[in-house]
Image (cartoon, helix red, strand yellow):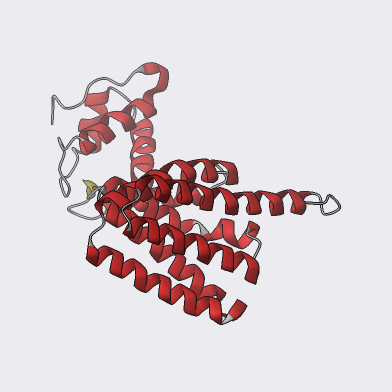
Amino acid sequence: MGDLFHKAKQSRIYQDVVEQIQTAILDGRIEAGERLPAERELCEMFQTSRGTLREALRILEQKSLIEIRLGANGGAYVKDANAELMAENLAMLIRSHNVSLEHLAEFREGVEGTVTGLAAVRSTAADNKKLATLIDEAAGCCERGMTGWGSFVQVDERVHTEIARIAGNPLYTFVLHSVHDNIHRYYDKYLIVGEIEMEENFQDLQLIVEAIADHDAETAQKLAVEHVRRFSRYMAMKKRQSADPEKPF
């Protein structure tokens, strides 16, 4: 690996070390399971101190790109940067304070609208049958009233992730699956929950699934955007109300 790395930029030494190693891993120039050179060699390659190098390696370990092993065969080993690790990092972003309710609403309107339109173009008879089965499950949850709310939320999530799968783009599938896996912190905090909201949600899903079965991409996309926008508006209202309880909706 002698020619893999070069002297780190002095203005931001440890960040540059992180970027060089990260790029080499993601580009595949260093493969999963491969051991990085010993600390002394890396310090010579980057022309930096051992303390700076260790700080860079600590950050790479936090990013799940490497693992530090102890013992006779110890050292820094490259981890497999698979979808599970990327999903974990995306989940941490969504659960952090860096993604606001407004950010989430903006993202979902654009992406879920596009995905639903693609699903309407690409769905098969088998896909439509599966979606119809999920809608029947959702209807059963609604019939139980608020006692069925928890089950309804789970079915709702499955409908959205199934639509993403039908769209046929693995990037959309991966991102939306991660979003819906971690969206509950927003629901728990901001979503107005009642039989009226559950019925509205159900009707939205039903109409979206019907548009997909009819291969009406324009209508499916429009319905998906309106669905996300409505419930984002409900959550924004509750957020404002929580901030100022005396202020009317």
- Side of 236 relative to 248 (left or right): left
Residue 24 in the image: x percent, y percent?
21, 33
Which quadrant, please, contains the N terminus? top left
Viewer-side residue, 247 vs 12? 247
Give the quadrant of residue 137: bottom left
- Considering only vertical position in the picture, is 17 above or below 132? above
- Considering only vertical position in the picture, is 180 above or below 15? below
- Side of 243 relative to 116 (left or right): right
The single residue placed furthest to the right in the displayed view is 246
Taking the image as drawn, is residue 85 in sight?
A: no
Residue 100 in the image: x percent, y percent?
58, 44
- Side of 58 relative to 37 (left or right): right
Viewer-side residue, 79 vs 57? 79
Residue 247 in the image: x percent, y percent?
84, 49
Taking the image as drawn, is residue 143 in sight?
A: yes
Viewer-side residue, 17 vs 83? 83
Q: How many marks?
A: 0
Which residue is at 22% across, 47% downward? 77
Viewer-side residue, 31 vs 146? 146
- Considering only vertical position in the picture, is 40 above or below 33? above
- Side of 101 relative to 61 (left or right): right
Which residue is at 37% across, 17% downward? 10
